[in-house]
Structures are given as structure tokens and as C-alpha cells.
Image (cartoon, rainbow, N blue to C red):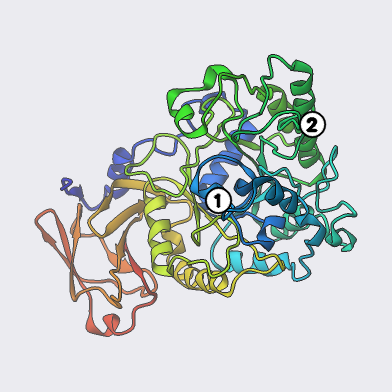
Amino acid sequence: MSAAISLPAGSLLKIALALLPLLLALSLRGEELPAAVRQTLEEWQERKFGLMMHWGPYSQWGVVESWSICSEDEPWCSRGGADYNDYVAAYEKLPTSFNPQRFRPEKWAAAAQAAGMRYVVFTTKHHDGFCMFDSPGTSYKITDPSCPFARDPRADVTRVIFETFRKADFMIGAYFSKPDWHSPDYWAPEWAASDRNVNYDPAKHPDRWQQFKKYTYAQIEALMSGYGPVDILWLDGGWVRPQNTITDEVRSWAGMKPWDQDIDMPRIAAMARGHQPGILLVDRTVAGPFENYRTPEQQVPDQPLDYPWETCMTMGDQWSFKPDDRYKPARQLIHLLIEIVAKGGNFLLNIGPEPTGEWADEAYARLEEIGAWMRVNRQAIYGSRPLPPFKSGRFCFTRGKDSTLYAFYLATEGESAPPAELFLPALTPGQEAQLTLLGHGRNLNWRPAEGGIIIEIPETLRAGMPCAYAWTFAIH
């Protein structure tokens, strides 16, 4: 158990600041970032909670995004026993029936905003190469006449989503896949594609690889120059990287061939920041100057990290829409948000839109419950800083900019109120400190105890708690 933190009256801010490690430092390379980028990074870290969306023609089948056309022996690449060539041919025809007439991004933005989300990352292109924007250099896109939705005035869904969420004061993030399995300059038709990687040696075919680099650059430049202010370029497909950055750990998950898949990130970064001076570059898993923050996937780190980070996680079981998906309970999602923020991270929560352009009813219901909780407790989330010991038992801790300390009590399944006497570990305020419950306002009685304090919860409060799933105590 962590030693208790003593907070004498009159010196609360000084001691809290002294205890706070530099977990929210801009990064190990932060001092090298341009001032505009540092400012964006600081703002992003203040916002804490974001929305991610994986959406494309694949949603019509309810299959995992892109991966079913990859011929690796992995569970997420399953085709249910179908012939590979027949399956891929049918998959590539999905855009000809993609017509999401219930696409209403203003409804998405309103629900996300009410839930307390403050930035959005949308999949402009996933690994299958289908573009959800009016991309140059390809007809495999939602605005092509072969797609029935191309006749809709909202056909460029990336533009409409960015504009809609921007009006709701969201930071805007463009997800973009570096590999492109539809491009003949990545998966060349002359050879079989045995895995996720480029299916030829770029060193043997430099002209072809140069064509792929040119295509990728043009697509990213279109997003950077023609879609308004963009705050985050979120690059996926970390196996597309210079050969000298490939480690044994990368080989273990990407089946890397001894080939250099360098797409010239310095040139892409210079172009992106030429159009968007403050943009954050997130070249996932490729540590270096183009990974301004890191993105642990479907997990929460055991300990705070010494660089900026976000957990990206699905609300259901799958990134893209799946019929009858199992959505995580609101209690679990709220606890995840609290723990991630207490450890200094952001929470990027993914919802996969249906093929119609709607979200499942369960997604709206979860956001509504999260929003009810956030309206009571948001001051302990936004702009907060981690506070040692970060997490202890069923408590997590943060510190506000005004030196207020916050202790979140994570309720167990079915627990509608904390006990009448609640032991708060690790924090020992001075005698003059005041303790309140967010959403209640009145001072609560408390007394010192070994290793922490005991908080007295009046029965009248226990009978009508201000929110569900977790309760936040503020120490002033």
C-alpha cells in the first residue's frame, strides 16, 4: 500500500505541486516541437475524452473492417470458410450498394458532446483502401459515381463530419491507413499477397514504390489542404515504416519481411504542417519525431506513462459495426475514463456506425449515461493532472488546476451509494481542509485514520446520490 500523502492546511497547492511528476510533459521530444504543435498538444491533453469512428462499405456485412481480405491466419481475418478470391471480389463490390441515407452527423455530434467528448477521430481510409473522402488518384471512394451515395449532397462524408463536429467545438482528427490493399502499387496484382505487407520488394521495384509514395502523399495532402482545420493526423498501419525502425517486437505482430516500406514521413510531415501548422502527427508504433503521442490499443497501462498518450478502445467488441455487438456497460466505460485520466491519459472511445448511417440504440444509451455522470463530475476530469498514488483500491486520484484534489470512488456492480463511513486511502488533509462530494456541495465530516481518512456520508445523501457508478470527493 502506498504511503499516505499528508496535506497540511495552508500548503495544499505547494505540496500537491511538489508531488506531481512531469507526467504531462509534452514528450521526450517535446522541446523540439514547434510552438503551434506544443499548443495543440496541450489543448488535446486538456480535453481528455474523444470519439473514434470506423465506418465504410464493410459495415454492410457487419464484418471486421478491412481484415477479412487479408490472407493471414488470424481470427480477425476470417472469411467463414469462403473461397478467398470469390470473397475479395464480392468485398470490393460493396461500394456499389453503400447508400447510408440515415447519415445524420449532427445527431452524432450532439450525442457525443452531451456525453462530454471533446475531439473526434474519423477513418478517412482504412487498410482496404476505400476512401470516405473525395480522394485524388482513385475511383475507390464514396464520391465515385459507382457508389449510390455519391448522388447525395453529403457524399463526401469526411467533409460533412469534420464540419459538423467542428461547429460543436470538437478538435478534428483524420485517421488514415498508410498501407492500401486496393492499390496496385501496394498489393501488386502480379503476385499473391500473403500477408498485410507490400507484396513485392520495394528495393527491386523502386519505381513502383515511388508511385505508391506519390499516391499516399497526394491523398494526405488533399485531407490537409481541402478539409478545413485539422488538429490530428492519426496514421495507422505501423508496419509501413523505414527498415531501420523495425524491431523484434514489431516483427512479432506484423510478420515483417526484410523490406524497407519507407513512405518518407519527413516530407509528409512538412507538407501537413505547411497546411496545418499546429497539427499533431500520430505515426502509430513508429517511435520518433512523428509520433507526438502514443495510442495503447484496447488496454489501460498499469502505471502512468512519461509521455502523452491515449487509450483507443471499442465501445463494443469490434471497431466497425457488428449486428448484436456487445456494448460495454456504462459503469465500465465511466471507470475506464476515470482510470485513464488518473494515469495522465486521454480516452478515445470508438463507435462503429451502421451501414444506414445511424448508430445502434445501445451506443446512444451508453453516451447518455456517461453524459449524466460527466455533468456532475466533469471538473475532476477536464484539465486535470495525475496525482500520486493515481489509483489505490477502489479509488483513483486527480488534481485540478486550482489545487483541488479529487478522489473518485469506483462503485461495485449494483452499488447505489457508498457506505456510511468510507475509508479514503493515501490522502491525509490538514485539519482546515474542506471535503465535499461533487453534485452535493455541502461539506462532509471526516476524520483522520491510519493511512488515510474516514469520510462520513449522511443517510439523506446516501438515499439520493447525485450520479451513478462512481462518486467524486473534492478536497479543498
Q: Which residue is rendered at x = 78% and y = 37% of the image? A: 219
Tag 2 residue: 215
Mark 1 and mark 2 lie on one chain; the one further toward the N terminus is 1
Q: Quadrant of residue 214?
A: top right
Callout 2: SS: helix
Q: Which mark is residue 78?
A: 1
Q: Does 147 sit left or right of 169 as displayed?
A: right
Could you tell me the amino acid type at mark 2?
Tyr
Residue 262: image location, x then y, percent: 65, 22
From this view, report whether residue 178 is shown above or below residue 381: above
Which residue is outermost to the top? Answer: 204
Label 1, label 2: how far apart the Cα atoms are: 29 Å
Q: Does 260 sit left or right of 456 as displayed?
A: right
From this view, report whether residue 250 is shown above or below residue 418: above
Callout 1: SS: loop
Q: Residues within 10 Å of mark 2 (few under 14, many from 20)?
A: some
Residue 403, visible in the rendered structure: no
Front residue (pair 33, 444): 33
Q: Quadrant of residue 113?
A: bottom right
**Quadrant placement of the C terminus:** bottom left
Q: Quadrant of residue 263?
A: top right
Mark 1 or mark 2, whichever is nearer to me: 1
